[in-house]
Amino acid sequence: MVTKKLLSRLFDAAYMQRWNDQIRPVELTELDKQAHKMVVAFVLGKYEERSADWNWAALIESGLFEYLQRLVLTDLKPQVFYKIKEDPIRYRELNEWVYSELEELIGPLGESFCTRFREYLATTDEPVHQRVAKAAHFFATKWEFDIIRRANPLGYEMERISTRLGHQQEQYYDLVGLRNLELYPKLRSFVDLCGLLRFQLRWSHVHRIPKTSVLGHMLIVAMISYLFSIQIGACEQRRVNNYFTGLFHDLPEALTRDIISPVKHSIKGLSALIKSYEREEMQEKVYPLLPETWHAQLQLYTEDEFRSVVYSEGQRIYCSSDVITEQFNEDIYNPRDGEMIKAIDDLAAYMEAQLARENGIGAPELAKARQAIRGRYASASIAGIDFGQLYAAL
């Protein structure tokens, strides 16, 4: 099961500053980088999904496992990490230490999950899902570097870093999606649009530590959704849909900005009006950037994202997560637990407010939000997750 310690640890990447030895015109954190990486991985994966050995769940877990690894190796500069990786014995010892640091946190998720994590750390092979994850990693890193370089074009190490990133990315040009990101401006614009959510802060009217962006929040929701899906024994497609709904559920905010709940619900009908406007903006500005065959999937992740749904005989059926578990927990039904993702979205907001409190921020807005969210889920059980018990432990 997912514990308080694991939830808190997932947020540690929000404290981790990237490129902190360079001039940075904006703050760049590990949480945001990992979130942007998984958006890029989704784009690259769409071009690989027809291959016989493709697996979306394996891609998601590659991203999740690297995220956990980075939480432990926060102080290692990339150059040092890659140097250690060249020595198989030292790299194995390093990863054994990484696992020992995380074993207490991930142990409650079950032996199968822990085994897959250890295999990820130990393997030197690169199946296609890992190649996609690594290509996305380098693309997102270069995206950050381009921002830094514009602020300091003649700075120390700029040319060397640029050359190194170029060589690393070139190793993955066999991936169709990576080549297309270079060739097609519209596809690149989609990645750039998602990247802008790195600079939209959550709770922007309240001082918080750590600060979290909309994009970073989306990854937190995605990861927790996936972990809860494992906990409830969700089928593979259900886990995948829950993850990517979490990852993209706030994408329309790239067009409308982050509108806090009190504003959305201050006037009757305003929330529905905002939703309608978001759909129009998505139709006009986002979907044209992507191949038409992707639109239905992105709609599943961004529209009615908090409603549980399955598909049977070509028909969309809205139902509860409990019904999904009882009747539709199979890949053929393409299930998605929208109500669970909504609860996780609120849980992530609660954790943001709670962590600010633990870091000495006593803003009344945060206290009010914590109280309201905790009260809403005091006796709630959704998709087999006892949220009341979870909040009692937070």
Image (cartoon, rainbow, N blue to C red):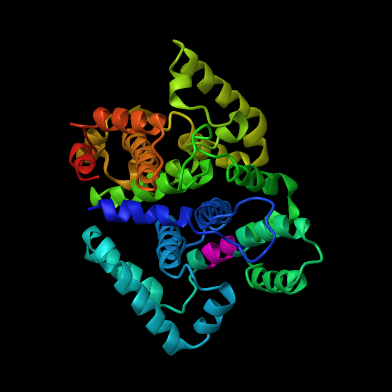
Q: Nearer the viewer, residue 169 or 162?
A: 162
Q: Residue at x 73, y 73 (%)?
A: 157
Q: Position of residue 381 (x, y in %)?
A: 20, 35
Q: Quadrant of the C terminus?
A: top left
Left or right of 223, for residue 28? right
On screen, residue 80 above or below 204? below
Q: Position of residue 274 (x, y in %)?
A: 53, 20
Left or right of 121, for residue 39? right
Observer able to see residue 234: yes
Observer able to see residue 308: no
Q: Nearer the viewer, residue 289 or 214?
A: 214
Left or right of 233, for residue 213? right
| Residue lying furthest top | 268
Residue 44 within the magenta-colored segment of the rendering: no
On screen, residue 264 above or below 249? above
Q: Nearer the viewer, residue 127 or 197?
A: 197
Dividing the picture into quarters, in which one does residue 62 lie?
bottom left
Left or right of 216, for residue 109? left
Magenta span dominant secondary structure: helix
Q: Position of residue 146 (x, y in %)?
A: 72, 58
Q: Nearer the viewer, residue 109 or 232?
A: 109
Q: Which residues are magenta?
A: 131-137
Q: Residue at x 68, y 61 (%)?
A: 145
| Residue lying furthest right | 154
Q: Position of residue 320 (x, y in %)?
A: 27, 30
Q: In the rendered picture of this protein, how many numbered marks are placed on residues?
A: 0
Dividing the picture into quarters, in which one does residue 349 lie?
top left
On screen, residue 364 above or below 88? above
